[in-house]
Image (spheres, coloured by chain):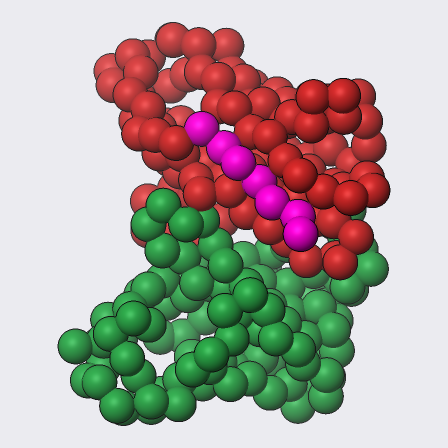
Chain colours: A green, B red
Amino acid sequence: NAGVTQTPKFQVLKTGQSMTLQCAQDMNHEYMSWYRQDPGMGLRLIHYSVGAGITDQGEVPNGYNVSRSTTEDFPLRLLSAAPSQTSVYFCASRPSQGARNQPQHFGDGTRLSIL
Amino acid sequence: GDSVTQMEGPVTLSEEAFLTINCTYTATGYPSLFWYVQYPGEGLQLLLKATKADDKGSNKGFEATYRKETTSFHLEKGSVQVSDSAVYFCALSGSDYKLSFGAGTTVTVRA
């Protein structure tokens, strides 16, 4: 049971570099989302997708880009890394957008440091 | 918009002590409420949930009751163990279908 798989687990970048955080789920879930976790702020929604080909912005989308070409994959791209993007990033999924009674399944996170 | 306010930590307890973490929310309509737990170095796992008023969620000795009149969903456990040391998040899923989280409460249980 893989669930939600995130890679890499750790990454260090220099300011201005770009990179892609990978997320894949094997549960055939339509709804996928990206969060960042910062101390004292809980988890904040960056972007989400309600199905292949459909994405939308969350609470803190600036500096990030997403696409959803397949049901399984939902990569998050940092366009030009900034120190303020140092954080732990979590990908999550649930069966559908409307299934709000259902819990989200989380990956183990990517710890990202921007120097 | 929807929001969640939970008791800030850190909280340090001795084994077998009683644990309460307060959580209140603001939302329109009838949100679903969740408690997630994050063990060190791991992602979030669902601990329990409640989807309508007066529902009680329970799991692993933890309980929380959905109180619409006080807009609260406090987490309780009668006798904590060292293995309960973790960060606990209260969350709600409201009319916009998005999940809103509280700031998290770090709990440390000492033997």
Residue B80 magenta-highlighted? no
From which residue to which does the magenta span run? B1-7
Point out the image quarter for the C terminus of chain A: bottom left
- Answer whether residue B46 is visible to the viewer in this image: no
Q: Is residue B45 left or right of residue B83?
A: right
Q: Quadrant of residue B64?
A: top right
Total marks in image: 0
- State the residue lying farthest toward the left: A115
- Answer whether residue A27 is visible to the viewer in this image: yes
Residue A38 point in image, percent of width and height: 36, 55
Q: Residue at x 78, y 64 (%)?
A: A96
Residue A71 point in image, percent of width and height: 70, 80
Q: Is residue A86 left or right of residue A41?
A: left
Vertical side of B68 occupied by A57: above or below:
below
Q: Residue at x 60, y 56 (%)?
A: A105
Residue A35 point in image, percent of width and height: 50, 63
Q: Quadrant of residue B17?
A: top left
Q: Residue at x 24, y 74 (%)?
A: A83
Point out the image quarter for the N terminus of chain A: bottom right
Residue B49 point in image, percent of width and height: 68, 35
Q: Quadrant of residue B8?
A: top left
Residue B5 magenta-highlighted? yes
Q: Residue at x 70, y 48 (%)?
A: B93
Q: Is residue B91 left or right of residue B93?
A: left
